Amino acid sequence: MALVAATFFWGSGFTWAKMGGETVHHVLGLPDGSPFGPIFLLAWRFLCASIIWLLLFRSARKGWTWRGVARGLLLGFLVGVGLVVQHLGLDRTSEAVSAFLTSLTILFVPLLMTIVLRKPPPLELWAGVALATVGVWLMTGATPHGFGLGEVLGLLCSFTFSLYILAVNAILPHESPWRMTAAQFVVVSLMCFLACALIHPKFLRPPVMVHVLSEPKVWINMLLLAVFTTDLSFGLLTHFQPRLDATRAALIYLLEPIVAAGYAAVAVHHELSKSAILGAALILLANIAVELISARKRQMEKPMLID
């Protein structure tokens, strides 16, 4: 339930990020689709989230070791690469194709578990993966014409996020989730500011940034993203994901596009097509079926009590 809540905030964040990024472009005179706006918003979102997190949680500020720093850098690097590559790829392919390729974590995670870690997921999870993959394809309407740089970046984003899911399950049982969450936020913010400097360095001058951030549609959406989509969602992820199989977590995260589409339909009146509704139903069905089958297996594996 904690990871479902995280996907709810991530899904809602797509609309906030789109509105904030478009406003950044409008203020700076950049064309829609430019990578600068979304990455600029990411940089400030994660910077604000890190400040809030460190101020609120004393456990995030104490107990650091060099090993913990290295682990936090790894997690933050994977998230940062995934987010930056995702936005750069989105500028070179359609939103539908980008969403579909990003969601292929549902295939990469179990494959990596099987080939690299020698820990194949249970059969019911493989069935859920197949059903959910069809659902994602129907929901995004992804019909790529050719395979160019945008599609390559989309696959790289998906692969990076898959490594991140596996890294969380490997690292968090041995580290404080409070510290690891803070480290991720700081690293992602620095990486996004660096990416902005490479794209349009002149827009990182303090007077320009103050002018951009003074726009209500920028700072309001940025704060919503920082508090809900970053602090709350990633806080839930680092605390609760290690309790689940990585493939199960990846399957739950596929609820994100359903929430994103539903929130957009309510907030900005983007209607869902029939195929999108069918795809969402398949993703939900996959999650419900896996949960019911897993619960039944756990019940059957319990030792029987004899009077």
Image: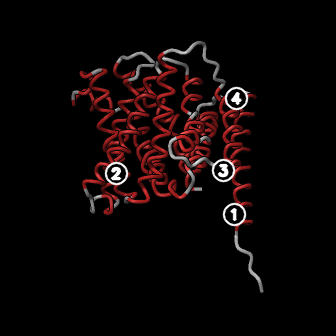
- Cα distance between the residues tagged 4 and 2: 36 Å
- Cα distance between the residues tagged 2 and 3: 33 Å
Which residue sits furthest bottom? 307
Which residue position is annotated with label 4? 138
Closer to the camera in the image, 278 or 129: 129
- Cα distance between the residues tagged 4 and 1: 32 Å
Q: Secondary structure at mark 2?
A: helix
Give the residue displayed 43% in from the left and 31% down from the top.
20
Which residue position is annotated with label 3? 122
Instruction: Give amino acid for label 1.
Output: Arg
Query: Is residue 272 left or right of 191 when viewed as pictured?
Result: right
Dot 4: within a 10 Å radius of its alpha carbon, few (fewer than 14), some, or many (20 or more) residues? many
Say which label, 2 or 3, has the lower sequence index.
Answer: 3
State which quarter of the image contains the C terminus. bottom right
Residue 139 at x, y = what percent?
Answer: 67, 30
Which residue sits furthest left? 206
Instruction: Give amino acid for label 2.
Output: Ala
In which quarter of the view is residue 7 placed?
top right
Q: Secondary structure at mark 1?
A: helix
- Cα distance between the residues tagged 1 and 2: 35 Å
Say which label, 3 or 1, has the lower sequence index.
Answer: 3
In which quarter of the view is residue 132 placed?
top right
Give the residue displayed 69% in from the left and 37% down from the top.
130
Dot 3: within a 10 Å radius of its alpha carbon, few (fewer than 14), some, or many (20 or more) residues? some
Give the residue displayed 36% in from the left and 53% down from the top.
180
Which residue position is annotated with label 1? 298
Say which label, 4 or 2, has the lower sequence index.
Answer: 4
Residue 246 at x, y = what percent?
Answer: 55, 49
Say which label, 4 or 1, has the lower sequence index.
Answer: 4
Camera-nearest label, 3 or 4: 3
Camera-nearest label, 4 or 1: 1
Which residue position is annotated with label 2? 182
